[in-house]
Image (cartoon, rainbow, N blue to C red):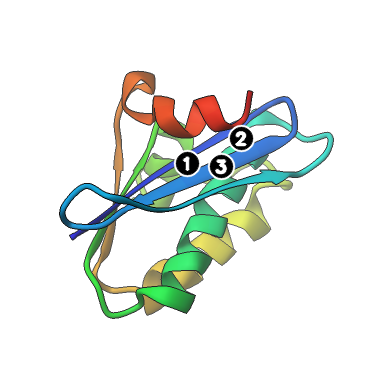
Amino acid sequence: MLKVITDGSGNGRCAFVVYDSQGNQIKSQVIVLGSCTNNVAEYQGLIHALEYLWKHHRSEPALVISDSQLVVRQLLGQYQVRAATLVPLHQRANSLLKVLPKVRIEWKDRSHVSVADNLMR
């Protein structure tokens, strides 16, 4: 199973890191977004990671880890999406998750996403 770590920052950046089933890093990427909120950056990090999985590993199972409770709980249907700026991002992430049925998303605290967080510094 692939392991994917995503993160976003209010400094207008997001990042993701992908590990293979043996724990070897196979991809890392930082994306400069420009001015945006932390929640927008968190969604963007997730979306970029899911797009990478779709292009390169669509048939493989993967666990995506995010430290954003808001994003994870919105995608799991536990929270409503109220901010208008997040609606299209939520829709895009959901559409990618639907075509990647072997991908699941999980919330972990910040210590679990430090590798992606450090890329954005």
Q: Residue at x 66, y 59 (%)?
A: 88
Q: Residues within 10 Å of mark 3 (few under 14, many from 20)?
A: many
Asked which secondary structure carries label 2, the reply is helix
Task: Name the kind of residue labelled 2 in the image.
Answer: Asn
Residue nearest the observer in this picture, 47 or 76: 47
Residue nearest the observer in this picture, 108 or 69: 108
Task: Name the kind of residue labelled 3 in the image.
Answer: Ala
Which dot marks residue 106?
Answer: none
18 in relation to 78, above or below:
below
Q: Residue at x 39, y 21 (%)?
A: 110
Disc nearer the start of the sequence (1/3): 3
Q: Residue at x 17, y 57 (%)?
A: 21
| Mark 3 lies on residue | 15
Q: Residue at x 35, y 74 (%)?
A: 57
Left or right of 120, for residue 6: left
Which dot marks residue 39?
Answer: 2
Q: CA distance from mark 2 to mark 3?
A: 13 Å
Asked which secondary structure carries label 1, the reply is helix
Q: Quadrant of the C terminus?
A: top right
In the rendered image, residue 115, in percent from the top left (x then y), is placed at: 42, 30
Task: Name the kind of residue labelled 1 in the image.
Answer: Val
| Mark 1 lies on residue | 71
Q: Residues within 10 Å of mark 1 (few under 14, many from 20)?
A: many
Q: Residues within 10 Å of mark 2 (few under 14, many from 20)?
A: many
Q: Quadrant of the N terminus?
A: bottom left
Asked which secondary structure carries label 3, the reply is strand
